Amino acid sequence: KTPADDSKDKPTIATELAAADVAEQGFDYYDGAMQYKDVVDELGPIPKLDKELKIGYVCKAFENEFWRMQKEGAEAALKPMNDLGIKYTIDVRAAQGETDEQGQLAVLNDMINKKYDGILMSPISEGNLVPGIENAIKSDIAMTVVNDAFMPHIGVTVGAWHLQAAELAAEWVNKNIGGEGTVAIVQGLPKAPPARTRTEGFKNWFANNNPKVEVVAIQNADWDRMKAKEVVDIWMKQYPDLKAIYANNDTMAMGALEAVKAAGKLEQVLVVGTDGTSEARKSIKDGELAATVDSFPYFMSQIGTEMLIRKMAGQDVPKVIYSPQAVIDKTNIDVQAEEIIGWTGFGEK
Amino acid sequence: MEDYIKFQNITKIFPGQRALNDVSFHICKGEIHALIGENGAGKSTLLNILHGMFSATKGKVFINSEEVKFTSAFEAIQKGIVKVHQEINAIPELTVAENLMLGNEIIKCGFILNKDQMIKETQELLDKLGCNFSAKEKMKNLSTGKKQMVQIAKALYINAKIISLDEPTASLSDGEVRILFKIINELKANGITILYISHKLDEIFELCDRATVLRDGEYIATLNIKQTTEDELIRSMVGRDVSMFGQRIKPFRVEKDKTVLKIESLSGTAGFKNINFELKKGEILCFFGLVGAMRTEVMRAIFGADHATGGMIYLNGNTLDNSSPSACVKEGIGLISENRKEEGFVKNLTNSDNIALASIQNYMNGFFVNRRLKEKNAVRVGEKVKLNPNNPDFMTSNLSGGNAQKVILAKWLSTNVDVLIMDEPTKGIDIGAKAEIYKLMEDLLEEGKSIIMVSSELTEAMGMSDRIIVMREGVIVAEFNRDEFAEERIITYAVGGMKNEEVF
Amino acid sequence: MKKFFKDNSRELSVVVAIVIMFVAFGIIQPIYLSANNIRDIIEQATIYGLMGIGITGVIITGGIDLSVGSVLALVGAVVAQMTVAGVPPVISIIIGLAFGFTLGIFNGILITKFGLQPFIATMGTMAIYRGLAYVVTKGYPVLGVPDTYRKLVDGEILPYLRVSVILFFLFAVLMYIILKKTKLGTYVHAIGGNEEATRLSGVKVNKYKTLIYGIAMLGTALAAMIQIGKLGTGDPTTGQGYELNAIAAAAIGGTSMAGGRGTVLGTVLGAILFAGLKVGLIVMGVDTFYQYIATGLVIVIASYIEVVQTQISNKTGLLMKIFSGKSSNKSGNA
Amino acid sequence: MKKFFKDNSRELSVVVAIVIMFVAFGIIQPIYLSANNIRDIIEQATIYGLMGIGITGVIITGGIDLSVGSVLALVGAVVAQMTVAGVPPVISIIIGLAFGFTLGIFNGILITKFGLQPFIATMGTMAIYRGLAYVVTKGYPVLGVPDTYRKLVDGEILPYLRVSVILFFLFAVLMYIILKKTKLGTYVHAIGGNEEATRLSGVKVNKYKTLIYGIAMLGTALAAMIQIGKLGTGDPTTGQGYELNAIAAAAIGGTSMAGGRGTVLGTVLGAILFAGLKVGLIVMGVDTFYQYIATGLVIVIASYIEVVQTQISNKTGLLMKIFSGKSSNKSGNA
Ligand SMILES: Nc1ncnc2c1ncn2[C@@H]1O[C@H](COP(=O)(O)OP(=O)(O)OP(=O)(O)O)[C@@H](O)[C@H]1O
Ligand SMILES: Nc1ncnc2c1ncn2[C@@H]1O[C@H](COP(=O)(O)OP(=O)(O)OP(=O)(O)O)[C@@H](O)[C@H]1O
Ligand SMILES: [Mg+2]
Ligand SMILES: [Mg+2]
């Protein structure tokens, strides 16, 4: 049983477009989802465009390094694409923080008013961009979602598969703690689906695969470093035998790590984060953080851009495309990301 | 006349203070009954019990032989029992009409306020009271006296059976007092019972039928005014003879050739203009005028509380830096403001802190305030002004009205200033204490200080001052030296009988 | 005429700030003044505006309501669930309003009957209502709000004119009438100006204070229902930090946090200034990090314009008085 | 003794609330009362406590400071950068304190010289300081705060005793002295009680008001420096929403948001109550959604205990007097 079962009876924005099947299943549990590589194999090279496009990316919040990496990736795709003769410009903007739902909507509306041809977006919540999306549909603007919520109106979502991320983490933890013991989860604000999916996915993996590992505690730390430290400070005494801590993102993982270090249990407790921020990578290199599930935001947004362009060029792009992700630990920390995910650029696929 | 209101064994104990002790007496229907006594005797407390503001610790109140126990002002007002409070309780941002009708608004169409009607009725009432301001004026723009008139009008508006007036004339001009008395007598003629608190004995004799005397929370006597003398009244209030008040006792000590403060063509936003005068060393200079003459505004401008729009001020021959009150205090000028609740004391501080507020540097011990020094001073000065209770830890906001005024006085007595401006310094102060304050003023002169006193009481002005300046509508209209003092002429100038006359 | 300017000097100062802002943004980015963009600004202003207008009434009493953001989420989630479950839109809206009113009254009761400080009471309910929003939705957004409902609260009835903007306008008028023309309005101002004096005048202070907390929340309930109409989703996580924006709209519009003073028009203008600023920074493409700084500066500068304008208008009053020899009616001084 | 109880009735009520909470949690989860856990609670109270103690001074003047959360991030980031760049820890700390002080003074100047409302002024600087924190760090956490620094501010000098707790204690004592024993303290209370009367007493109200905004921010600067010591990282995103928690600590501790009343001890206790609650909910493993509700309820109940306790203590005062016939000193009435 997966969290998909819970979400099956979730209500949907059923009416508008024929993408209801994805909405019903949820982006993370979609049967028809394809891996990026398979999509490229199927669709072939990126078609040339008949005019120069103006593309916008409504990102989430640049306060968070994860979204900055998305931005950098989207911008980095420009040159190779242009070199391939695919001419476009890209403008990446974000809201003021991850609670600024209205601000993000204003960014989207501005891009529509300025007549962008295509828009990538990473909505803060399931609904906050809907009025803008409706405007964009009216103006015939092509759209693609990058990471997070699937929007039936939009039809294409590129993102890391959160459930898979959680399962990768669980598998890694299982292996590295020797298949038994107690673990705990530091959860993000129960706002974005990632927090829920990662938490559930991690917990369920053990329930389904190895009941000898028990998830003894799940606590919310609002994506905040200090709050994560405070939670783990208490766990260090309450659960002295804890073997691993899984955090829904790297910022909280770093806070958790400080608490583990303060308790002198670095050797005993493995801390696993999510995202693959520079800070997390450095810590892995230093032998402190045990691992992070890297979803390669730098490449994810490039894939998003590619899919948007394919769509605008008239190709039939699948509804859900999973971008690559992998566990980074001390064994592969020095390996180039391109190598880990097999990234070869846009040209010769 | 039968018993109408009956107080039976009323005792009221506040934390830290016994305000009333076993007080019993009655009030007849349709009489004007005075409550008199020194500051802190318990007069306001007694009324507050009647009007549902406090509940008595012990004892009962009967009206028409029926026991009443109001738990809020609302209940009392519903029964037609209203009070004009000692402190002005106005809402500054609302208009006069809204203040006056508060709780008794006129409604049309179910829930919309009938503002036109409210303004009309308010204006009618104000006109009847001889008030020359508009019902549409915002309350905050009114002078203290006018605010007081609004409070009184408010009580009259409600169809009351019993009206209590707690020192209603403290900030009224003579003319306004006349009108008020006329109205009170009309009310009495209509069978309305009036309770009247005042420290002004002449008013009591003129207006009231009987007077109940309280002293230190104890009931002393109820006297029939017609058969009582002023001395008798004072003796029962104070428990001793009080020397004739409002007269200088000590020798005059004006140094005519030493000008302390010199004001040249001062004008200000409130509307006063071309104010010129000099204050001599050792002088008590009185500013007399009707309420609204803008004396307060002039004093505030001198003290830097408001910014003047023009003019020069010299202190001991040098230009005075009056950019702020703190600059003035530093230069040696102090101001006792007229409005004690809003500008006088700080409600969350104790007596000793309030008294020390303008002179903390005197009680410093390095970096720290020496609490003992501060309290010692508070007790010393409190004794001088006969503060009751003279307890440095007592919250000033819990003092009786007159005693709060004494705390403000004490604050400035603790501050070493050369020029003290006293705006209505004896407002709400009992006879005994008034004499003390006059004595203190003379003591200050003896210490080489000079005083500007703003007063609306002519007896006080003539009794105490070396010189009187009369103001009307923002200009100085006359000046009298002590040997020229003449009651009628001063009043005539103040009310504007001699317009545009050359005075200097 | 002069009287109009003097009476509304605070509102005028916000208008001045808005005009300055529009001209400045318009010069740099002419698209800012396009009809589309101005429509966007007004639509953005509705949510904070509705919350702010309600809160204005509360702030005038000298209180505050921090729970509005949570109520936005809770009422939105509950109404969304109802519409999804097939409850007719109009009935859902009525229930939503009643629910919002009740939540506000609960705040009011904590403050009046239980004697808690408004800040702390509503901080408590902010957490409680947020928790309830999570509990009723199990943390999931409520998807699939039906189109009939969405059209009802946010349909475009004329080009450039949405129902939501009309609702915003209507609520503003309602609150204007309540605050200016009714007994409750007078009492609200009186309580804020001097609660004790109001009580001594025989006004049942607690009753009216509680009531205004309830009525104020109608604005937030309306905002919640418009928001789910706009988004098609009831999100239990929405509204975090909105209370500050709503309060900012009121404060920029001249509402005194100390109570006693504030107007509906001012808050509406404050909300428009706020929305215009946000949209303007986005249209200009200002870097997010600098957007924070710019937002802060504009809040500070807009309020300062208000302070200065008030001073000038007081002086004008003075000049008027000096020259005409007549006493002017109102002073803007506080 | 009796006097002590009466004088500190507000603080006592928080103690009562804390005791109730400890007993309740302790019964359900005995580990809650372990020395380790209690140490954790105290350590967790330091950050909000330090911020709250500072803010108490500001609130007593009738003001408020919403910018503390942003200052926490900004000062933390800057000090972290300095220590990483090799500036000696002690010098970094001194600069950090001075920097925090300056930021507070800037708030104060906006409020006094420019006449802005405290709420709106500090809401503006909240955005400005946050933006600055992002700009100076380019949005990246500042990594690698050296161990010498970390030991200095958060080292465990005795079992169960960290430097940070001592710093917390020292700052509390400092603020206690400032508020109780100095001229500034008297003025701060006086300004909160009646600003106009204070000004007319010749007190330079603006000067002292500005000063207390600066001093208050020392608490937050200290919290920032302790936090980077605890985390080893200066994070520009930290501190969001902390202002409400800091204010809550003060308010639960009996500080009146209307000004004029508040004590350092009360705020310290308020912070401990708050931390104890948080830890308790974690130890009990309460579901996150219900944690919100529980937190809200505890805030409301704790404040209500204070209200009731104050009423009782007033009555006790009265009874004491009746029986002893002696006058007691202070009235708890405000
Ligand atoms: N809330 C209170 N708490 C404590 N003591 C109080 C309180 N209110 C009044 N008192 C005390 O009760 C006594 C009587 O006060 P009251 O106001 O009745 O005097 P009063 O006769 O009206 O004096 P005045 O002429 O100065 O107005 C005073 O000693 C005063 O300090
Ligand atoms: N803020 C203001 N704006 C406009 N007019 C004002 C303002 N404050 C006071 N006034 C007016 O200024 C005039 C003078 O005030 P005030 O009555 O206090 O003078 P005064 O001589 O001190 O009287 P009193 O005898 O009460 O001391 C009054 O007519 C009052 O209405
Ligand atoms: Mg009295
Ligand atoms: Mg006067």
Image (cartoon, coloured by chain):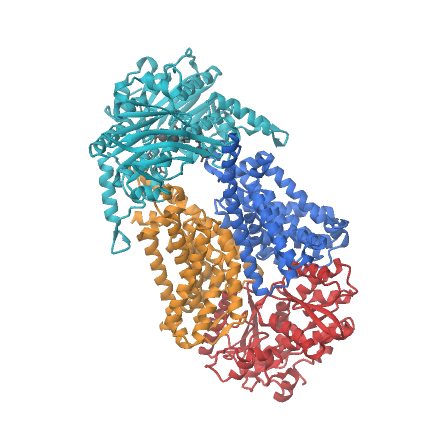
Chain colours: A red, B cyan, C orange, D blue
Q: Is residue D274 left or right of residue C219?
A: right
Q: Check the image and report above or below for A201 versus B456.
A: below
Q: Measured from the top left, where is residue D292 in percent x and y?
A: 56, 61
Question: Image height check: is B176 above or below D168?
Answer: above
Q: Is residue B246 left or right of residue A30?
A: left
Q: Position of residue D327 (x, y in %)?
A: 51, 30
- Does residue D145 lie above or below B501 as drawn? below
Quadrant containing the N terminus of chain A is bottom right
- Residue D300, how many percent across, how many down? 52, 54
The number of callouts visible is 0
Quarter of the image that includes the C terminus of chain A? bottom right
Q: Is residue A210 visible?
A: yes
Which of the 4 image quadrants contains residue A181?
bottom right
Q: Is residue B325 above or below residue C99?
A: above
Ligand 1 is located in which of the four quadrants?
Answer: top left
In front of the other: C259 or B473: C259
Q: Residue furthest top?
A: B251
Residue in the image at 46% along x and 81% along y: A16
Q: Give percent across and percent down for residue A117.
A: 51, 77
Q: Is residue B217 left or right of residue B80?
A: right
Q: Is residue C219 visible?
A: no
Q: A49 or D328, which is in the foreground? A: D328
Of C173 and A229, nearer the camera is: A229
Residue in the picture at 57% in, 28% down? B361
